[in-house]
Amino acid sequence: MSIICLGIEGTAHSFGAGIASSGGDVLSNIWDMFSPDEGGIHPREASRHHSDVGPSVIRKAIEVASIDVTDIDLVAFSRGPGLGPCLRTTATIARALSLRLNIPLIGVNHCVAHIEIGCLESGFKDPVTVYVSGGNTQIIAYAGKRYRTFGETLDIAIGNMLDTFGRDVGMRFPAGPRIEREARNASNYHQLPYSVKGMDLSYSGLLTAAKRLVSEGVPMADACFSVQETAFGMLAEIAERAIAHTRKKELLLTGGVARNDRLTDILLGVAKRHNAVFHRVTPSLAGDQGAMIAWTGILQHEAGDRLNIADSIVLPKWRTDEQDIVWRKS
Amino acid sequence: MEPWTIGAESTIYRLEQWGRIVLLKHRPQKPYLLKAIDEFLRTSRTSRECKMLTVARNLGVPTPMVYWVDMHRHYIAMEYIQGKQLKQLVAELAADRLQKITCKFGKLIGLLHRGGVVHGDPTTSNVIVNQKGDIWLVDFGLAEMNATVEMKGVDLHLMKRAFETTHWDHEEIMWSAALDGYRTIHSDETENVFSRVEEIRERGRYH
């Protein structure tokens, strides 16, 4: 019989609720992104947003899935990593539902969920994953029962870098899409710091130099273009290092920044050079949302993973490689 | 010519020249990168690698000899070291031998660091081991001079992560052997570098 799982995501700016079945169908996937009128994301304000919109987002997810609340067999939630206040709000909602409906609670690692929903959609068995978002920049691959982080940022995440640059030049959060549009009208490239260390990279020097470009009067389009080409070039290099190192034949691009077409083109080129298949996760499944939590919750449940409410404390610094991936065989 | 191996940023050919085996390392054009960035990387990495292979050797670190360079077409011809990558050997080596070799690896990184140089990509793919257990460091395209404590900390962090992601069954003995080897090279900075490694690991994440 098919199992139905409600997945609740709330690690950072977005609150989402998604419903998935054990057959691999996403029945609904609703989210609401906190976008302040000015400035960036304050953890307390974001958690307030989650508790405000949470009930209606969950109600809508149940409605769109055309199920009754009593049809839900499991509730999964994003247990970490993320912003403490946001995680706690989300966990509280999940615990309450688990108790009220008397169904098991599953704690899901947010980063792992991004990979698993990508694998569900692409049919990939064992990819190198490029996970890029506001809070994360990681190159992840499965090895020895864990998803291991082969490369990551040594300072700020790519999305954070783009947003901070955007905010500095007067763009609203999230700035990524606007930067991508601006970059299309560029005519000149300006060299910016390119910092790759092994399979890691660093964006803080690039950010400082990019802000300076704009303050020195470089046209916005040229600055945006230069930021994108440099930042994505670095990312391509570490992804390529991971592929060359692991010899894996699938490359998966996911996370909010996966929506960027230029980044997609570059990684497609990387995959080609190494005879690997490339997949970019669909926008609705690439950003932070509940369907990925629901689907990973099902995988964990089927492998016998359980979480007592008393032990369900959130894990703001939960590393991708700290969880045994019990549902993967090889 | 058929490539001998395709790396992340280079294609390597093995050929015979002047009666010996020569490795030809080519940094090919990458059409998916912006031309200006691609050209800059190919040129700077080729020139850096040549220079740093020699700088490292002068610090007492065995590296392949450079025979000739073509800066315009981004080729380096270098000595072929008869041996295997440490990466390929880890699983088959007896524990004491693995410990010994990893300790040497740590010592060589220590020698570089004492000389103000970081390797930039100190993974087990870039360590060549011969039959006798002598080791060489290769792939200096990301190496840097005038290294700070931060840069050295990052270098060791990368080494630790390579053990973690690729040799998880031997991670602990390798890391402690590498640190033992590193410690044998006396420097005032050693403890600072070690504590920086821990700090670096915590960055780049949600807090």
Image: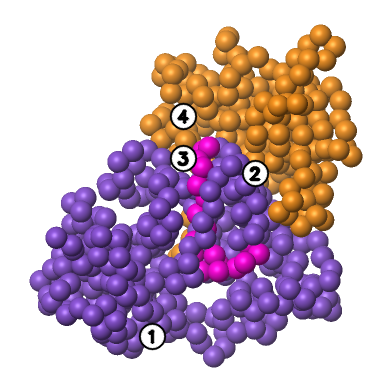
Chain colours: A purple, B orange
Q: Is residue A16 a member of the stretch shown in magenta?
A: no
Of tags 1 and 4, which is closer to the observer?
Answer: 1
Of tags 1 and 2, which is closer to the observer?
Answer: 2
Residue at numbered disc 1: A49
Secondary-structure class at tag 2? helix
Secondary-structure class at tag 4? helix
Q: For the point 75% across and 15% down, which residue is it?
A: B21
Above or below: residue B197 compared with residue B22: below
Q: Residues within 10 Å of mark 2 (few under 14, many from 20)?
A: some
Q: Residues within 10 Å of mark 1 (few under 14, many from 20)?
A: many
Q: Amino acid at mark 2?
A: Arg
Q: For the point 36% across and 49% down, which residue is it?
A: A322
Q: For the point 45% across and 77% down, which residue is it?
A: A13
In the picture, residue A31 is in which quadrant? Answer: bottom left
- Report whether mark 1 lies on the same chain as mark 2: yes
Residue at numbered disc 3: B165
Give the chain of mark 4: B
Would you say B78 lies left or right of A319 here?
right
x and y percent of residue B87 in the render?
A: 52, 27
* Badge 1 vs badge 2, beta-carbon distance below 8 Å: no
Above or below: residue A130 compared with residue B84: below
Span colored in magenta: A246-263
Of tags 3 and 2, which is closer to the observer?
Answer: 2
Residue at numbered disc 2: A273
Q: Amino acid at mark 1?
A: His
Q: Residue furthest left?
A: A102
